[in-house]
């Protein structure tokens, strides 16, 4: 299994922390987010780790990782950055956001899951927004699950629905799932015009836009219900929480 980590964003909400440093390299108690992710992945014998870089790419120095530069990071959003690594969609894949920390329990559950396209979901997600004033709950990527399938994924879903959980930024693709994902993106790239799901265009799309489009085309998206510890690091408040949680 290969791993792709999307690390091509600016991370501007962290302010001075990311003025000249990619968010993935922000320090969490003596280790960067990326080092913590890669060390845990390697404990599971996942050694082919591809990092998609954007601004300040020269700051990435861990030679055990493979780097792919997203030269168009200023022109597109998260989905476009992921597809900068399209050449690696040739086998089973794990896709991670570079600003998410998670423990062994979370990763183990994802790796053991059997599905073509699966996304990690936390059903006990609301507790992560207690006191999180700099990142309001309305910004959560929420997934509605029915009959063990994700039937809707976007922000601003009904957060009071017990069948709703938060997508935590980890996706697993089987070899077939990776092939389907790449083919669908290439088809969209060659023919799609105008607004794409909740994005103004395909260029401005996020991963959840692609997943929602898959759902509407009849593709099965499988929820991988996780427990264990995880957190997203998007704001200074999040950073302090991460340093408390992963000390």
Image (cartoon, helix red, strand yellow):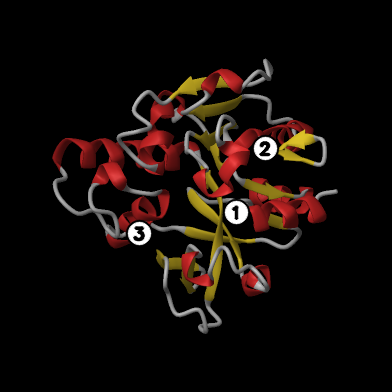
For disc 1, the neighbor class at 10 Å (few under 14, some 14 to 19, many from 20) is some
How far across and how far down the image is residue 43, in percent? 79, 34
Pick the quarter of the image with the N terminus. top right
Please name the residue shown 16% across and 45% down the image.
192
* Residue bearing the label numbered 3: 212
Q: As rendered, which of 111 and 19 lies closer to the eye? A: 19
Please name the residue shown 81% across and 50% down the image.
246
Where is 20 relative to 65, above or below? Answer: below
* Residue bearing the label numbered 2: 26
Work out how far the residue at label 3 is from the one at label 2, CA to CA, in angstroms: 31 Å
* Residue bearing the label numbered 1: 235
Residue 140 as seen in the image, left or right of residue 226: left
Label located before the other in sequence (3 or 2): 2
Please name the residue shown 61% across and 36% down the image.
24
Where is 167 relative to 178, above or below? Answer: below
**Secondary structure state at the residue bearing disc 3:** helix
Q: As rendered, which of 208 and 233 lies closer to the eye? A: 233
Q: Which quadrant holds residue 2?
A: top right
Work out how far the residue at label 2 is from the one at label 1, CA to CA, in angstroms: 12 Å
How far across and how far down the image is residue 12, in percent? 50, 44
């Amino acid at each position: 299994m290969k791993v792709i980590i999307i690390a091509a964003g600016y991370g501007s909400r962290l302010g001075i922390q990311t003025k000249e440093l990619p968010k993935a390299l922000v320090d969490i108690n003596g280790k960067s987010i990326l080092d913590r992710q890669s060390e845990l992945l390697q404990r599971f014998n996942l050694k082919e780790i591809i990092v998609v870089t954007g601004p300040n790419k020269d700051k990435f120095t861990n030679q055990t990782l493979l780097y792919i530069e997203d030269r168009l990071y200023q022109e597109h959003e998260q989905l476009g950055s992921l597809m900068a690594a399209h050449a690696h969609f040739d086998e089973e894949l794990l896709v991670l956001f570079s600003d998410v920390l998670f423990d062994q329990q979370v990763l183990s559950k994802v790796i053991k899951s059997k599905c073509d396209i699966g996304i990690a979901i936390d059903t006990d997600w609301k507790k992560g927004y207690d006191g999180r004033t700099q990142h309001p709950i309305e910004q959560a990527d929420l997934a509605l699950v029915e009959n063990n399938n994700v039937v809707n994924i976007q922000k601003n879903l009904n957060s009071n629905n017990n069948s709703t959980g938060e997508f935590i930024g980890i996706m697993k693709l089987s070899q077939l799932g990776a092939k389907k994902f790449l083919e669908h993106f290439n088809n969209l790239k060659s023919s799609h015009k105008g607004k794409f799901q909740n994005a103004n265009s395909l260029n401005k799309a996020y991963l959840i836009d692609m997943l929602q489009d898959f759902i509407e085309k009849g593709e099965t998206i499988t929820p991988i219900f996780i427990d264990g510890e995880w957190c997203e690091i998007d704001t200074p408040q999040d950073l302090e929480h991460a340093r408390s949680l992963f000390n």
